[in-house]
Image: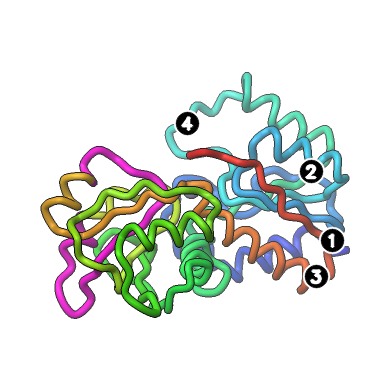
Amino acid sequence: MIDLHTLVAYTDALLECGRFDDYAPNGLQVEGRHQVRRLVAGVTACQRLLEVARAQEADAVLVHHGYFWRNESPRVVGMKRRRLAILLEAQLNLLAYHLPLDAHPRWGNNVQLGRRLGLRVLGTLDLPGTQGLVWHGELPQSMTAEEFGRLVAERLDRRPLLVAGGLSPIRRLAWCTGGAPHYFQAVAEVGAPIAVDAYLTGEASEPVTHVARETGVHFFAAGHHATERYGVHALAAHLAEHFSLEWTYVEVDNEV
Ligand SMILES: [Zn+2]
């Protein structure tokens, strides 16, 4: 059992939330009861996740995708009202960490995904405008794009979309979890010695096909949800251990 404000202050500091220009508020988004004993973690604060958290008598929900995104309507109506009603009626706290959780060098989505794929994680590729969100690393040995696609499918339990950039094998990769097809061209045009053979992110967009064909760098879309399960899972496990909390990760499957 831990006081809510101790939990929030610790997590905000751990993830260095002040460093990021984000699209949504990080940290405590909806306040519930002031003592936290049981934590439920998930990728997105959707209604299904909140229902499971309520049924498990959780005190706090920890997610990567919370609410109050820049440019969304601020009205509390419809789907948003139903979600907030569950939180407020059950006195559930909602803690959400977006870019700080993508970027964290230990608990972050990117580093956790790199490890899950068996890569030697080398750090961030410091490209302009990417806020340290593009990472790079190496496979233990070269493989074809199809072989790497099968490895991703097996480790993430979801088949990725592959846009082949040619026939060349993959040894060096860059990646960014979630929805980051827009970084592909900058990544593909990075020169030696940090040039990569492939780029992996969660979602695709129409221009990536042409970037792959014209630069020879392979592109993989491995799922926005599937690439972002591992940061919140690792962070929740750490918080639970640090503060002696009960916790579960709840997988609400998502094809995208
Ligand atoms: Zn995301």
Quadrant containing the N terminus is bottom right
Q: Residues within 10 Å of mark 4 (few under 14, many from 20)?
A: few
Instruction: Give the mark nearer the N terminus: 2 vs 3.
Output: 2
Identify residue for label 2: 53
Instruction: Give the mark nearer the N terminus: 1 vs 2.
Output: 2
Q: Nearer the viewer, residue 126 or 42?
A: 42
Rounded to the nearest whole Å, what is the CA distance between mark 4 and mark 3?
Answer: 34 Å
In the rendered image, residue 75, in percent from the top left (x then y), is placed at 57, 24
* The stretch drawn in magenta includes residue 202: yes
Q: Nearer the viewer, residue 53 or 221?
A: 221
Rounded to the nearest whole Å, what is the CA distance between mark 1 and mark 3?
Answer: 9 Å
Rounded to the nearest whole Å, what is the CA distance between mark 2 and mark 4?
Answer: 25 Å
Residue 15, by quadrant, is: bottom right
User: From the viewer's perspective, is the residue at label 2 or at label 3 nearer?
Assistant: 2
In the rendered image, residue 161, in percent from the top left (x then y), is placed at 37, 46
* The stretch drawn in magenta includes residue 154: no
Magenta stretch in the rendered image? 185-208
Instruction: Give the mark nearer the N terminus: 1 vs 4.
Output: 4
Q: Which amino acid, mark 4?
A: Glu
Q: Which amino acid, mark 1?
A: Glu
Question: Which residue is at a point 55% across and 52% down the rendered structure image?
Answer: 157
Identify residue for label 3: 243
Identify residue for label 1: 246
Q: Looking at the rendered structure, which numbered label has been put on residue 221?
A: none
Instruction: Give the mark nearer the N terminus: 2 vs 4.
Output: 2
Rounded to the nearest whole Å, what is the CA distance between mark 1 and mark 2?
Answer: 12 Å
